[in-house]
Amino acid sequence: MKDAHSWLGSVSDMMSGLMMIFLLIAVAFMLEVQSDKLKVEKERQDAERRASTYLQQGETIRKIAATYSELQIGLYQDLLKEFRDDLTKWNATIEADNTVRFNEPEVLFETGKSALRDRFKVILADFFPRYVGILTAYKYIGNIEEVRVEGHTSSEWENATSITDRYLNNARLSQERALAVVQYAYLLESTANKRDWLTKALRANGLSFARPILNQQGAEDQGRSRRVEFRVFTKTKEQILRIIEVSEKQPQEQK
């Protein structure tokens, strides 16, 4: 009987041990399941946050694009309304992107020089104050990032044969011409009350013959390539870059 009781006790102890092991396994399994559920829930929440962020960014970009489109169209209409009667006599055009282009090289500068001809000074004295008046109107001024005066040349340069000499000489000349236009326009008495704004916005940029005007055959039109352009850059690009920067930071902050 003693051996029987001893044997039954051993079996009971073994069963208790097995039950404890099964209990521990069950608890571990439940904890793992709970952990997996928490991970899945966190991933779901993160996905929802990212989706919400992307939707917000998409809506923001849509609004910026709409604002940009309205700005471009409105500015084009105002520029055309202001200057339509002058464009022919100035041999100037207003392009679809609101670039004001002065196309007459014989009016602008002497060949190879950067001093403004008297006729171009008269044109600028008439054009520039009216142009600045439009850009600094309430509906535009907050969206204007930069007003860039660009000097463009043809690919010719005296007797230079290498593209290096032609490019570098024309790069210097185009920059000097753009700067001459900026200096003259900036110092006009008619825009003296706008100089604080001009100091922040007005820039000179020489582009050599990087952007030639082509004729119908696709070749460089050397006469029309020698030109001066006034180009407006808005803050749209800056706003989009800010959105992209924020979106790149968010995943790092969520880790």
Image (spheres, helix red, strand yellow):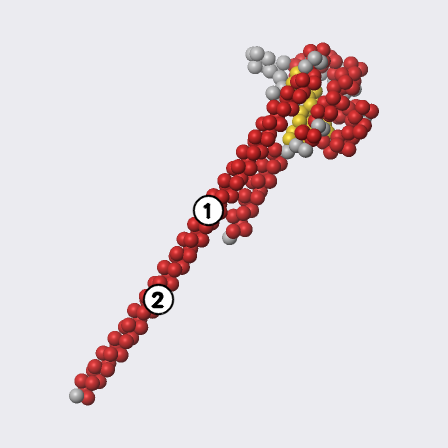
Q: Residue at x 82, y 24 (%)?
A: 189
**Residue topped by disc 2:** 27
Q: Earlier in the sequence, mark 1 or mark 2?
A: 2
**Residue topped by disc 1:** 48
Q: Residue at x 54, y 47 (%)?
A: 250
In the depicted view, which residue is nearer to us: 242 or 76?
Answer: 76
**Residue 52 place in picture, x, y as percent:** 49, 44
Task: Work out whether 172 lies above or below 200.
Answer: above
Task: Work out whether 127 lies above or below 146.
Answer: above
Numbered mark located on residue 6 in the image: none
Q: Is residue 191 toward the left or the right of residue 6 in the image?
A: right
Q: Residue at x 50, y 40 (%)?
A: 55
**Mark 2 Cα-neighbour bin, 10 Å: few <14, some 14–19, many ≥20:** few
Q: Regarding mark 1 in the picture, which secondary structure is present there?
A: helix
**Residue 44 place in picture, x, y as percent:** 43, 50
**Residue 213 place in picture, x, y as percent:** 62, 17
Q: Please name the amino acid that badge 2 sits on.
A: Val
